Image: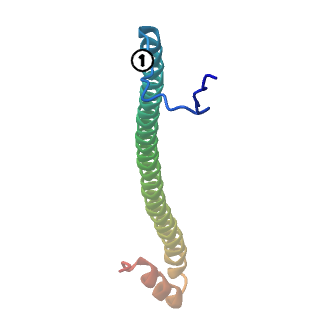
Amino acid sequence: MARRQYRAAAQGRGFNAITVSNANLTQLEAESNRVLEGMRARRDADLQNKRQILQDMQDNANYYDKVRKRDFNIASTNIETQQRQAQYDEAERFKRYQEASSGAAKVFENLSSLSNAAGQKAGRYTEPVD
């Protein structure tokens, strides 16, 4: 009888290199390029966004500087106007006081011809005021 030889079910086959075709390499390269382009696009969009935010912040700061200067000028003008108005009011008050004083002095001068006491009062109103 002929002897049968034993063969193990799980026989070692040794190292078998995976064969890669040019089509697989081209597909792998295309996928890598697509990922790279996506990363570049995201980076460029992020940079553009940051530049836009910076420009908006600078524009905002310039606008508020302009508004603050305008408000300061308005406030300064208002204060100057109030000071001038106070000076005009004081000058008008002084003018009215002089007119009232001169009117009273004329009355007492006219009465001074009638009375000695009225003459003394007329002298007080005609003296210069310090």
When asked about the image quadrant of residue 107, the answer is bottom right
Q: Residue at 42% of width from left, 23% of height from top?
A: 17
Give the farthest residue toward the top: 23
Front-most of residues 35 and 25: 25
Front-most of residues 76 and 71: 71
When asked about the image quadrant of residue 6, the answer is top right
Mark 1: secondary structure: helix
Can you say which quadrant of the picture contains the C terminus? bottom left
Q: Residue at 38% of width from left, 79% of height from top?
A: 129
Q: In this view, does 105 lie above or below 24?
A: below
Q: Residue at 45% of width from left, 21% of height from top?
A: 18
Picture coordinates of residue 103, whole percent (x, y): 53, 69
Front-most of residues 125 and 78: 78
Amino acid on which the number 1 mark rests in the picture: Glu
Q: Is residue 6 above or below residue 69?
A: above
Front-most of residues 42 and 25: 25
Q: How crowded is mark 1: few (under 14 residues within 10 Å), some or many (20 or more)?
A: few
Can you say which quadrant of the picture contains the N terminus? top right
Q: Mark 1 points at which residue?
A: 29
Picture coordinates of residue 75, whole percent (x, y): 47, 54
Q: Residue at 46% of width from left, 41% of height from top?
A: 60
Give the farthest residue toward the front: 1
Q: How many marks?
A: 1
Give the farthest residue toward the right: 1
Q: How is the image coloured?
A: rainbow
Q: In this view, does 85 lie above or below 5?
A: below
Picture coordinates of residue 71, whole percent (x, y): 47, 49
Picture coordinates of residue 2, whole percent (x, y): 61, 22
